[in-house]
Amino acid sequence: MIYGSGMLESGITFDFGQLVLDCEFARMIKHTIQGVPVNDETLAVDPIKEIGPGGDFLMHKHTFNHMREQSQPEMIDRRMRGAWEKAGATSAYERALEKVRYIIENHKPDPLPDDVLKKIRSIVTDTEKEMGIKPKSK
């Protein structure tokens, strides 16, 4: 279980940018703990035999077919410094905030089913009664 995503200062502060970064880290951890399959295909036994020492492995179909199996982070920029600078030299946190803004502006959640809304309302109403809170008049 991962606890505290998006929290700063021992949970006193919540930061949406930090939440996006923490989600990225969780995805990377999940990818890592799934392990690396070791077999003739993942070891590229046949392409190694085919290409031989000093050959071009990057242009081989096997490399193309498997290149996306590694962790594919969105916020962590793995480009060389020159390419990173040319692209604006933004930090991972700046990119995370950009993603937050995009989500806030564009996410359209599916509405909850009526029975779920009624259940939530009944929980709130029951709790208000228990605590002696008078419902707001409409």
Image: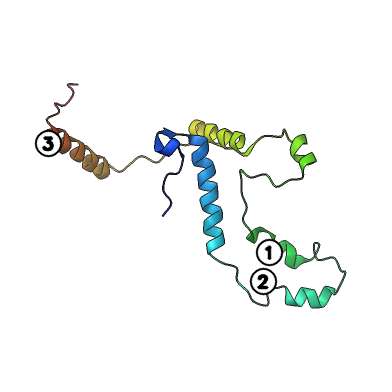
SS of the residue under disc 3: helix
Residue at image x 85%, y 75%? 52
Mark in front: 2 vs 3? 3
Q: Decide which of 100, 119 is in the foreground and name it.
A: 100
Residue drawn at x 72%, y 33% as measured from the top left? 88
The residue beneath circle 3 is: 130
Q: Quadrant of residue 43?
A: bottom right
Of mark 1 and mark 2, the one earlier in the sequence is 2
**Disc on res. 66:** 1
Amino acid type, mark 1: His
Identify the amino acid type marked 3: Glu
User: Quick one: SS at disc 1?
Assistant: helix
What percent of the width, then of the height, locates residue 89?
A: 71, 34
Mark 2 = which residue?
42
Which quarter of the rendering shows the N terminus?
A: bottom left
Q: How is the image coloured?
A: rainbow
Image side of residue 105 versus residue 50, left or right: left
Position above or below: 46 against 55: below
Mark positioned earlier in the residue sequence (3 or 1): 1
Of 27 and 113, the residue lying toward us: 27
Observer-side mark, 3 or 1, equals: 3
Q: CA distance from mark 1 to mark 2?
A: 8 Å
Under mark 2, the amino acid is: Thr
